[in-house]
Amino acid sequence: MITWQSIQDIFQGVTSLFAVPPSLAIARLGLIALGFLLMYLGRKGVLEALIMIPMGLGMATVNAAVMFFDPLKLHGGGGTLFVEAQAGATTDGVRNAADLMTILQIDWLQPIYTFTFSNGLIACLVFFGIGSLLDIGFILARPYTSMIIALCAELGTIVVLPLATCFGFTPQEAAAISVIGGADGPMVLFTSLTLAKHLFVPIAVVAYLYLGLTYGGYPYLVRALVPKRLREIPMYPQKNQREYSSFQKMIVAAVGCVVLSFLLPIAAPLIFSLFLGIVIRESGIKAFQDLVSGPMLYTATLFLGLMLGILCDANTIMDPKVLPLLLLGCLALLISGIGGILGGYLMYFVSGGKVNPVVGIAGVSCVPTTAKVAQKIVSKDNPSAVIMPAALGANISGVITSAIIAGVLCSLLKIAS
């Protein structure tokens, strides 16, 4: 005989929705709706589809099914897809390897989190793939313009770092939050794992939500700060511009990798991953480049977006520390965008009007998103204007600059902790 209790036992998701406080239930429903919205905007091209579509589906599903095990109620928990990091620990805190491996075999996302996400490996894999797509010739063509704009685009990190301490965060937590201003997702993951592991999940979720929104938000910022007559400025190749061979670019990348790793060993995993990708690109080993820039990059990106969505459950978002993270992360990216545009204006005046100020937004190192945003804005006002090479130079320089700044912060604050 079918009873109301048997129906509740079968459809446990509905039961769990009414078994939690109303605020948490509303948050779950809101995050389900947000997940669908992210998927829709990703499909429409408003947001970055590679991250937003799997992230949106993961976010909607995890909040619908409450798929997390409670580590304190492991043997009677209701999770089916993902377990907490402490699952499998015994009462005295020692992990039971056999039990844990049994769980890993069943809950298919847990191994991905444990072996690639929680230790920063997935950030290295993404950086590896990104490096294989980058042509450092764009930096070498305009080195000073690229570096100055990239430095200006770190303004959000510089401003939010002391501001976050005013919200009660420790210097290590503040640094992990402020690095969101660099708009470099793998670097944000790496820094939060190094300096504030307990805030890793909310920082990662907040960072990638905002990085996706740079597609939609930065064009309005550029149009508000750069008048149409300046947005229309075309950027022509410089006279007597030197052409660099693949061998020369490979040597530059190798030297840069060794020097930066020597100066900032704490950030060497990401530095090495990025420059190894660049070296593979310039080495002419097509089989390696096809592997790294194709299957490896897209697999890592898929699971990165999926894991970020799965981690974005209502309990995480309702954490009292997350609201300041939301505000500070948004502020960091806003100020970095303004800083980049100010850098673009600086180079516009220094060059005598030959640099389009819109290139400045590409200094925010969400590569290649902000470079594409810059070109799209300019093309709308002047279809014949091409600024993509200069934007990519600033963009790639921004990646390297954010890695250096994150490495400096990790080196200083890791010692202080």
Image (tube, rainbow, N blue to C red):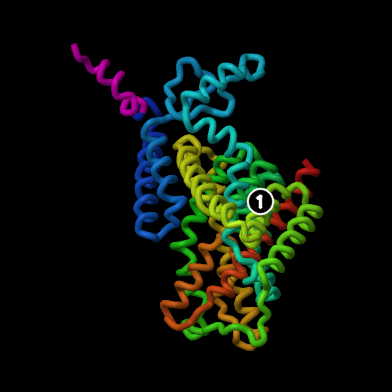
As displayed, is residue 212 above or below residue 9?
below
Residue 405 colored in magenta in the image? no
Provide residue 369's location: percent of width, then percent of height.
51, 62
Q: Quadrant of residue 92?
A: top right
As displayed, is residue 299 above or below residue 145?
above
State whether residue 296 appears in this view. yes
The front one of 99 and 72 is: 99
**On the picture, is 212 further left or further right than 321?**
left
For image coordinates 34% across by 28% down, the residue present is 13
Dot 1 crowding, Cα within 10 Å, few <14, some 14–19, many 20+: many
The quarter in which the C terminus is drawn is: top right
Residue 12 colored in magenta in the image? yes
Work out which residue is located at the far left of the displayed protein and give it.
1
| Most frequent secondary structure within the magenta stretch | helix
User: Which contiguous range is marked in magenta?
Assistant: 1-16
For image coordinates 47% across by 30% down, the residue present is 108
For image coordinates 65% across by 60% down, the residue present is 283
The front one of 319 and 268 is: 268
Provide residue 409's location: percent of width, then percent of height.
73, 52
Residue at which label 1 appears: 273
For image coordinates 38% across by 40% down, the residue present is 60
As displayed, is residue 34 above or below residue 84?
below
State whether residue 329 appears in this view. no
Provide residue 110's location: percent of width, then percent of height.
52, 30
**On the picture, is 229 further left or further right than 143?**
left
Provide residue 380's location: percent of width, then percent of height.
41, 77
